Image (cartoon, helix red, strand yellow):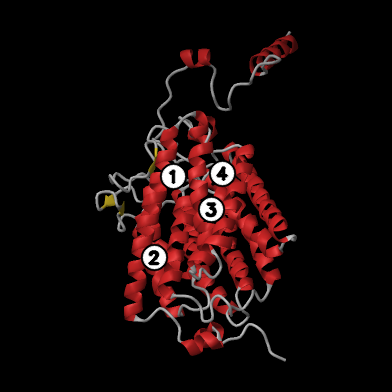
Amino acid sequence: MVRFALSLFLLLGLYTTVPAFGQDPPLPDTPATDAAAVAPAATPAPEAAAAPDPLNTGDQAWLLASSALVLLMTPGLAFFYGGLVGRKNILSVLMQCFMCMCLVTILWVVCGYSLAFSGTEIGGGFAGNPMTHFMLNGVADDKSFIPAGEVKLGISQQTFMVFQMMFAIITPGLIVGAFAERMKFSAFMIFTGLWSLLVYSPVAHWVWYGPTHPIFGLGSFAASDAMPEGALDFAGGTVVHINAGIAALVCCIVLGPRRGYPTQITPPHNLPFAVLGAGLLWFGWFGFNGGSAFGASNQAVRAFVTTQVAAATAGFTWCLIEFIRNGRATALGMITGAVAGLVAITPAAGFVSPASAIAIGAGGTIVSYIFVAFVKPALKYDDSLDVFGVHGMAGIWGAIATGIFALDTYGVGRAGGLINGNTAQVIAQLKAVAVTIVYSGVVSFVLLKVIDLIVGLRCTEDAEKMGLDLSDHAETAYTIS
């Protein structure tokens, strides 16, 4: 009898604890509802401290990897530019690109990030307050970043900050190609520091963080869902490429042409270096565009795909144009075209389809080729490495093309672009392009003139003959046997 009672007790216990087939078991340490109804109330435990907002480890990992990819683009740019200059100036180009990595990082931490991405503003919305996040004050690494309203991303603000830092680094680096082989290193450092704070950070604020300024309020995150509205710039077509391209044009005009331009210019001394640099740029661009989705999402995948499609189309298109005009394609032409396609797709990457990426990439090459092959020789400005022709003009085309091809279901979530019948988006893009051109051009011109008065911009004629590697850095890249 005792054995029977024990067996029955065990069976009943198993019945009440093992779920029926197809049913989920109760959560651990969670009592059943009917048991709670009859059980005496437990003494409440002391209230635990509020846990920090959960971060999505996948999104965090993708953004950190993307940040590293974007940083790699600056050494890639150094090799791309370095291979295209004369052998006596390659170290000066490498030094300028690496100085951007050092100097801009410091300035970004001190106040550059706050100028670009502070929620409190100065000048009626002209820029963020530099003291809000001075020395990264309040930029947390353990809480979800809230760009607008109550919308929480899966990444911390410090992750967002370091990703955006890499954009701030490479943008003045792009300008280097316009004044290569003739600007003094001291003048370059002053110009880069001031330009990053007075031009790059405000433009980033206008396009990416939603200022209230009536003229400069170009784009924003919607408070309801943090979706972009106003001017669309997915990864920096306006903030990075148009901004740098216009400054580059102003630089080469203010400095004047290189000695002997255009008939006695030294040809590229190491095209394999340039091809290597272009490959590193292409590789890093997947972080540049893919990371701008701010998470490992379907939009990141879309940006990844459209980036590859546009770059490949643009490189092919440049080769095709060379075949038609000259009967042969060149390595320099192919890598120039690929970079033009990467620039053109940057503002549109997460907003358009792969089919549209083909049109954007081909258009980027056509526009850039016209300015490199026809406009520059006609106007006789010495943009040494075609920064304006490639980055400036392909960036302008890409910004406008974003207003044409953006889809309402592809990360915009509203009216889309002209392809969806929304002409207002094209107008918003044109306004952003025009404001950036005027502001970057005027401020860059003023900065250059002031620096020229203080320390002088251009190296001496003897230094230019000797090469900036020796005159500025007392080094040579190659041992002469």
What residue sits 51% from the left and 81% below the top?
Answer: 259
- Earlier residue among tags 3 and 4: 4
Compared with 428, 160 (above or below) is below
Q: CA distance from mark 4 to mark 2?
A: 27 Å
Residue highlighted by disc 2: 195
Query: In the image as oriented, which residue stretches furthest toward the top?
Result: 1
Report whether 46 appears left or right of 387: left
Amino acid type of the residue that numbered disc 4 sits on in the rendered structure:
Ala
Q: Could you say whether the residue bearing mark 2 is in a helix, strand or loop?
A: helix
Q: CA distance from mark 3 to mark 4?
A: 14 Å
Compared with 46, 475 (above or below) is below
Check contact, mark 3 vs mark 4: CB within 8 A. Answer: no
Give the x, y percent position of residue 183: 46, 77
Amino acid type of the residue that numbered disc 2 sits on in the rendered structure:
Trp
Nearer-the-camera pick, 382 or 116: 382
Q: Could you say whether the residue bearing mark 1 is in a helix, strand or loop?
A: loop
Q: Could you say whether the residue bearing mark 4 is in a helix, strand or loop?
A: loop
Compared with 448, 321 (above or below) is above
Residue highlighted by disc 4: 349
Q: CA distance from mark 1 to mark 3?
A: 32 Å
Residue highlighted by disc 3: 394
- Earlier residue among tags 3 and 2: 2
Q: CA distance from mark 1 to mark 4?
A: 23 Å
Residue highlighted by disc 1: 145
Check contact, mark 4 vs mark 2: CB within 8 A. Answer: no
Compared with 10, 478 (above or below) is below
Residue 444, quarter of the rendered image: bottom left
Mark 4 Cα shell of 10 Å, populated few (<14), some (14-19), many (≥20) = many
